[in-house]
Amino acid sequence: MTPRRRLTLLAVTIAAAPLVLAGCTADRDSAAGPAKGHVAAPELTVTPGDKTRDVPISAEVGAVVTGGRVTAVRLTDDKGAQVKAEPREDGSGWVPSAPLQPRRTYTAEVTATGDSGATTTRTTTFTTMAKSTKPHITSTLYFVGNRTYGTAMPVTVAFDPAIPKEARADVQRRLFVKTNPPQPGTWSWLEDGSQVYYRAPDFWQSGTTISVRAALEGLPIGKNLVGDAERTATSKIGKQVSLEIDNATKQMTVLRDGKLVRRIPVSLGKPSTPSSSGKMVIMEKHERTTFDTRGDPNGGYVVDVDDAQRLTWGGEFIHSAPWSEGEQGYTNTSHGCANVSATAADWLMGVTQVGDLVTVKGTEVDLQPGNGWTAWNVSWDEFVKGSALPVPSGLKPAPVAPAHPGAVAGGSPAPAPSVSGR
């Protein structure tokens, strides 16, 4: 997403978005034009409306201008302190940099300037509601700050309970991603509303800095729920690494910057517990972990494994499997995981990173949407259909995409469920 154009207004950077609240109050209009005649000042409407009460703490200062553009915004609280915010990309409003405080009064002064130089200023004062007692929707941001991720890393936000379809646009408006250098993308919802992914049409460029803000605290979601928290993170994209696993050959191909680094024999899921085919990304890495599948219909074992890298929520990993080294490269014997030798697994841990692309092909089943971070398992045209907001028509993949995306170095998001397969 292109960095938003920042406005430095009265020593404060201010941001916000249009509210569904109606109304405005005129403070003053001024016209500056040629001496020969009056020049019409721009028309300006500001929200929330003046004297509005019980405004959510997720409130934004919205502005609609006819015949000009907003050139100054000043937002202060009831003690006269300036409130930091920054403009939305389309200039329709300003989003405070942190949730507003409950039961506080705020004043916004907005000035618009016409092409002729004539100005209009509107001032509105509003009061926020008491702290909400409605149940919260729990959000989880799977993008941790101060990490280096792979070039296929999607920004993922999960919700419990899932977001109903009619509320997704409001939630999506409060999810912000900035990239440097600019690489615009969009959000896309899973059909059930339990997760939303953000990615660009092409894989991230190595060296890109990504900043994420999920500004959901106090946001009304539907009639009976509110958002739970403000979540932010900034991390970087590392070198390009990808893994390709072919069931036909029982080989994993490791590529860096599109060039072959190593081939590794694998043993995938046996026919009764097949591995998934599709494009997935490494979700987390463990030097040592425990697989416990006693609660699964096809489970019934507990085993400690080394050098495990998660690919799906359902428990598919790449991991060290010294017990199957004789079958690796020849026969599938696992419970859905990609088994590799102890030596290869240890080597992979030093090469791969969370967010690297892993492509598996030729198995008996396909990767299901949402079983892991599956943002890359669909085409761009399919991905944009999942957005609850319009997507610019010019946002398209490059004519020639990188052949083998992925990345190196960095960190892991919060631990995933422990149920796993062998």
Image (spheres, rainbow, N blue to C red):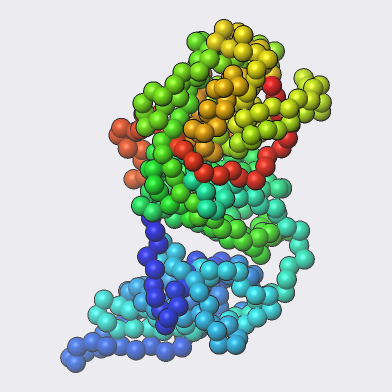
Q: Which residue, as the protein is rendered here, is positioned at the far bottom?
A: 35
Residue 100 in view: yes
Residue 162, image x, y percentages: 68, 46
Q: Is residue 110 depicted above or below 344 in this figure?
A: below
Q: Is residue 415 left or right of residue 204?
A: right
The quarter of the displayed image where residue 403 is located: top left
Q: Is residue 322 left or right of residue 93?
A: right
The quarter of the displayed image where residue 314 is located: top right
> Could you tell me how many numbered marks the image carries?
0
The quarter of the displayed image where residue 71 is located: bottom left
Q: Is residue 297 depicted above or below 409 in this figure?
A: above
Task: Judge by depth and name the residue closer to the eye, 64 or 252.
Answer: 252
Give me the residue at 69% from left, 27% from top.
Answer: 305
Give me the residue at 66% from left, 52% from top.
Answer: 139
Quadrant in which the C terminus appears: top right
Q: Which residue, as the protein is rendered here, is positioned at the far front?
A: 343
Q: Is residue 2 depicted above or below 361 in this figure?
A: below
Residue 236, image x, y percentages: 46, 49
Residue 201, image x, y percentages: 40, 40
Give me the residue at 32% from left, 37% from top.
Answer: 398
Residue 177 in view: no
Residue 255, image x, y percentages: 42, 27
Q: Which residue, as the protein is rendered here, is positioned at the far left?
A: 36
Give me the residue at 74% from left, 31% from top.
Answer: 290
Q: Is residue 355 depicted above or below 143 in this figure?
A: above
